[in-house]
Amino acid sequence: MKDFNMVIAGFGGQGVLFLGKVIAYAGLMDGKEVSWLPSYGPEMRGGTANCSVCISDEPIGSPLVVTPNVLVAMNKPSLDKFINSVAPGGIVLLDSTLINDKVCRDDVKVFYLPATATAEENNMKGLSNIILLGKLFEQTNFCSKESLEKGIAKSVPAKKQHLVATNLKAVEIGASL
Amino acid sequence: MAVVFDRPKALLDVPTHYCPGCTHGIIHRLVAEVMDELGIEDRTVGVVPVGCSVLAYNYFGCDVIEAPHGRAPAIATGAKRALPDNVVFTYQGDGDLIAIGTAETVHAATRGENITIIFVNNAIYGMTGGQMAPTSLPNQVTQTTPYGRDVNYSGHPIRVCEMLSTLDGVALAQRVTVDTIPHIREAKKAIKKAFQNQIDKKGFSIVEVLSTCPTNWGLTPTEALKWLNDNMIPHYPLGVYKDVNTREEAK
Amino acid sequence: MGERVLMKGNEALAEAAILAGCKHFFGYPITPQTEVAAYMAKRLPKIGGTYLQAESEVAAINMVQGAAACGIRAMTSSSSPGISLKTEGISYMAGADVPAVIINVQRGGPGLGGIQPSQADYWQATKAMGHGDFHVLVFAPSTVQEMVDLVNLAFEKADEYRMPAVILSDGMLGQMMEPVEIKAAEPKTFDKPWATCGHGGKRAHNIVNSLYLQANELERLVKERFERYEKIKATEQRAEEYMMDDADIAIVAYGATSRVVKAAVKEARAMGIKVGCIRPITLWPFPTEAIEKAAKSVNQFLVCEMSMGQMVDDVKLAVNGAVPVEFYGRTGGMIPEPAEILAQIVELNKKGGAK
């Protein structure tokens, strides 16, 4: 894949927007053009959140991703909402701890990853998003390893920099799933 | 020969447009005298309303902003926040202050905005020709209450000082009038206190001045003063409704 | 070049305003612009400025007017329904020649409308930002970087011409993050001898006022203001031309829509269609010169907006019947996809030009 058009979706509080920011920052560290666009408004308060992330060599046209080639789905409503919009040949990563369904499409590559369970097993509660990121990175190499690490460091708030190492560990665990 | 009476420096030497017998002239003079006595004209920004005193920017010697109808407290808030060391006052009528500008008035008060408000209450819309004001009295005949203000139909008049005195941000809420020499003296003292409070950073101060409108009340100037005395003062009692200074003294 | 960081459009804009010397912000919460206020609330008190949450949009714009009348750079931001409330104050500021910057992060309308990105306030911004005979400067960013750059320019031009300036953004540009470089440069400032900041005993009193009871006096002042507008029209038009050199079809689009249009233009070029994009950066003054120039060489125009067609009026006036002007728009918060625009281009290309 040359251009990445991603949709990352889940419950509010799962770190959906944060994951999108890490990906966008990693792309930026690689010298690419990037954009990040969140859903916003009252439905956010109701629990579902999603964001569009684009990484490209060219300036980003619309930052709203309508036909993603990568979908990260962290709960069932998100999978249901976006699965049919994924471009043929696209990649879908889903958290199989929270989603029991199997994807019916055979023109996309699906990874069923027990991200939430894995996070809990490794005492990394709240990092299921980064575990999924690890697998996404391992599968697509959407950026260099170095840029991924920088992207995490840039996205973690200054006061929480001590969590960067744990995040990097979560990436490793995710990649190995 | 000794000069015993002169025009205050902060009141420019231009004829005003006010009707004969209107008390705006007295109140302008009191504000100007206070500016002179406190020596603040050169750093004062006045904010004038829409209503009879819209042209007050031509009369006061300080810098003046003419505000949209009812927005003087918001304009004053912006000016005071931008220039905290300057003195900022508004001069507003009843329609401006407590009809179209109610939100601006109440919120400037509750923020304790460190400004001074001179509120001229004459119970009628003067500039537009005598319509009902938010402070028109029950049964008062105006152009838009031709059979008298029926409170069951048009609502009740608002007692501004009483209402604002419930707000924590208010430093001074006092009602005065200018119908007699003693009342004028009292009014000046209140206005001076309202400016001094601002200089001392005590917060929001409002002086409500009961005023006449002979033209739209359909009375002669002296009849108007009597009407004010007989009708307005009973409904709007004079006095101090809140004063942080006396509370401090009491402690 | 400084470091490029990822920032939300709304936040980048707020930081740029602070760097432009705006230390006083008055606002009221509304989606999708609230990040501007939140950012200002965090930053301004720490640098000796004012962030004040007003009781209403009406109060907020008048607080801006109060601060700006005193010669201080001040700003407010809102989204479409809130801007309607601010138009009273904007008219007064125009009538009193008070400069300030107003941000409109547009959402769908009319009424409460929606909260998704829209460009349906073009008419309001460029033609009727309140009652009376007047204009405001209107800048239309299309990237987060441009949100930053145009805010600084808006403050500068507002002061230079003593008039309100509007940044016409939208929910997409406000909410999205993009790489941005924010340079701290000394803002260009202007003397304001007209400001009501206390005469200090050194001059006659200043009056900031929009009331003129003598009709001939008011006419004279309005005419003077319109002479200033003519000068602005002659010198301040800004537009970007994208792949226009050999274009047969010109697409005119601003803001968020222009991003989608450019993506479609690129795809159409790959198909061999000679199409380009003219992107107005100033909406008032409208870049008529760029449109007039293109009208001499292209066969047709297509105007794309996130509205039912508002800017298309100004394009038609500039083209003045020389070639056909078509319109394509989405509204209510719908963002067009490049494929939709591409389909329009392909269709126009089939029709060919009348020239």
Image (cartoon, coloured by chain):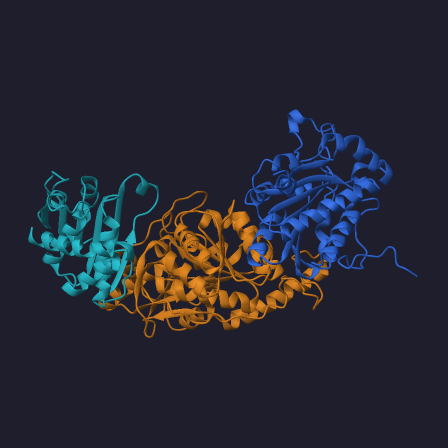
Image position, residue B72 (x, y; %): 62, 49
Is any atom of residue C348 visible in this view? Answer: no
Q: Is residue B144 above or below residue B104?
A: above
Q: Residue at x 80, y 33 (%)?
A: B229
Q: Colour of chain A?
A: cyan
Residue A157 vs residue C185: left or right?
left
- Splitting the image into 4 quarters, where does residue A162 fall? bottom left
Q: Is residue A150 above or below residue B151?
A: below
Is any atom of residue C256 visible in this view? Answer: yes
Residue C20 vs residue A4: left or right?
right
Image position, residue C228 (x, y; %): 59, 69
Q: Residue at x 41, y 67 (%)?
A: C149
Q: Quadrant of the N terminus of chain C?
A: bottom left
A77 or A173, which lies in front?
A173
Q: Residue at x 67, y 47 (%)?
A: B194
- Splitting the image into 4 quarters, where does residue B13 fall? bottom right
Query: Which residue occupies the extreme top position in the image?
Result: B152
Q: Is residue C73 above or below residue B158?
A: below
Query: Which residue occupies the extreme front position in the image?
Result: B251
Q: Is residue C129 above or below residue B155?
A: below
Image position, residue A85 (x, y; %): 19, 48
Residue B161 vs residue C172: left or right?
right
- Of all chains in the rendering, the one displayed in blue is B
Q: Quadrant of the C terminus of chain C?
A: bottom left
A13 or C317, which lies in front?
A13
Q: Colour of chain C?
A: orange
Residue C239 vs residue B195: left or right?
left
Query: Which residue occupies the extreme left position in the image?
Result: A176
Image position, residue C101 (x, y; %): 50, 60
